[in-house]
Image (cartoon, rainbow, N blue to C red):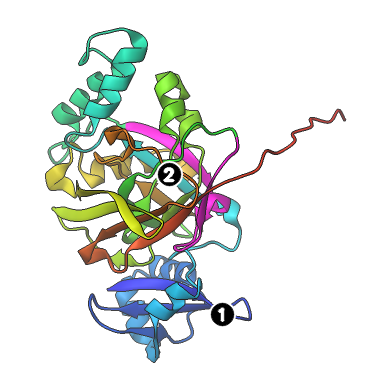
């Protein structure tokens, strides 16, 4: 089942569901995907069971909604401060090579001797623990709250001080926290974990700065488990032409960590188990246009797709004007 959100003229939300390849229909009486997911989490029912109980209504033309800019992120929170955008890196086979090379050059050490490669090797050795064991913890980073969550079709705005605005095609896990503080996964969505790779290249300790950027995911969430072998494509369109394109792989077959291990090392922190909160956690990638030496520019369209996850994710790169920051004294 694929689930999405479309905004209405009066500010309300239409929740739409469909099977892959099928037409979407309204979920009757659903205020939002968050409300549906919380009902499921607190009742012990599956999300599909809650949807089935409510029933389906009129057909929703998702392509038309996309063309008109009516998609919302496929999950939102009424208070954006209670939606968390986070991620883990160095999780995919081959994901360390680009980063290792650039950090080796900056640090003036041999490739393979960087902290990047050391952490990647830790994941290879301990990222897929046996039952009853705790796996090695991954690299982790924070991107922002719901104010940084960008709707499919909307602009990904790079700040004026950024050195780069580059795409990262990833899978994101989508979660809600029940009233009893228990995390529940809704499913997975395609995501663009938009980052500043030039800033990161200056020094590995700038990683945190490079990740404080908006992100987009969706337009649809694939409810349930993810396939073990996910194959998609990432491309950049400029002036109506594809100027960069590459396939990307995800799923545990192509990863050095299991999803369960990555989830554990996120939700082991009590701060991430606050009742009612939403988490969008991005699981990493091995495919970047930056790694091929491609330079993005304002107006470029990022398009990321993976067949089992619904409509492709599209966003346009924009660059913000400079903000005047004045620190007052109280």
**For the residue labelled by badge 1, is the local secondary structure a helix, a strand or a loop?**
loop
Discs 1, 2 touching: Cβ within 8 Å:
no
Res. 194 mark: 2
Q: Residues within 10 Å of mark 1 (few under 14, many from 20)?
A: few
**For the residue labelled by badge 2, is the local secondary structure a helix, a strand or a loop?**
loop
Q: Is 163 placed left or right of 255 in the picture?
A: right
Magenta span contains residue 159: yes
Relative height, residue 217 to residue 285 (above, below): below
Relative height, residue 224 to residue 80 (above, below): below
Q: Identify which residue is drawn at 48% across, 52% down.
A: 299
At which x and y percent is residue 84?
A: 49, 48
At which x and y percent is residue 149?
A: 51, 54
Residue 79, image quadrant: bottom right
Mark yes or no: residue 234 visible. Answer: yes
Q: Circle 1 is placed at which residue position?
A: 8
Magenta span contains residue 212: no
User: Residue furthest toward the right?
Assistant: 330
At which x and y percent is residue 240?
A: 37, 60
Relative height, residue 16 to residue 267 (above, below): below
Mark 1 vs mark 2: in front = 2
Q: Is 324 placed left or right of 226 in the picture?
A: right
Q: Which residues are magenta?
A: 139-160
């Amino acid at each position: 089942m694929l689930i999405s959100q479309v905004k209405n003229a009066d500010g309300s939300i239409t929740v739409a569901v469909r099977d892959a390849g099928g037409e979407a229909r309204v979920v009757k009486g659903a205020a939002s995907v968050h409300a549906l997911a919380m009902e499921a989490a607190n009742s012990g029912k599956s999300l599909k069971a809650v949807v089935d109980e409510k029933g389906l209504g009129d057909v929703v033309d998702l392509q038309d909604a996309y063309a008109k800019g009516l998609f919302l992120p496929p999950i939102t929170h009424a208070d954006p401060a209670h939606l968390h955008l986070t991620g883990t890196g160095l999780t995919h086979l081959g994901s360390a090579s680009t980063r290792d090379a650039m950090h080796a050059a900056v640090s003036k050490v041999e490739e393979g001797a960087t902290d990047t490669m050391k952490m990647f090797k830790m994941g290879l050795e301990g990222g897929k623990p046996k039952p009853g064991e705790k796996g090695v913890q991954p690299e982790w980073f924070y991107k922002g709250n719901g104010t940084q969550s960008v709707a499919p079709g909307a602009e990904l705005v790079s700040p004026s001080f950024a050195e780069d605005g580059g795409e990262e095609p990833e899978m994101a896990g989508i979660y809600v926290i029940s009233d009893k503080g228990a995390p529940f996964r809704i499913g997975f969505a395609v995501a663009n974990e938009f980052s500043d790779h030039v800033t990161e290249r200056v020094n590995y300790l700038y990683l945190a700065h490079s990740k404080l950027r908006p992100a987009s995911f969706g337009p649809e969430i694939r409810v349930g488990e993810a396939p073990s072998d996910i194959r998609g494509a990432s491309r950049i369109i400029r002036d109506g032409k594809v100027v960069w394109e590459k396939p990307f792989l995800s799923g545990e077959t192509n990863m050095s960590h299991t999803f369960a291990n990555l989830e554990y090392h996120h939700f082991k922190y009590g701060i991430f188990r606050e009742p009612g909160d939403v988490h969008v956690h991005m699981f990493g990638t091995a495919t970047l246009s930056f790694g091929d030496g491609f330079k993005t520019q304002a107006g470029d369209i990022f398009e990321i797709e993976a067949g089992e996850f619904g409509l492709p994710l599209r966003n346009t790169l924009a660059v913000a004007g400079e903000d005047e920051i004045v620190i007052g004294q109280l």
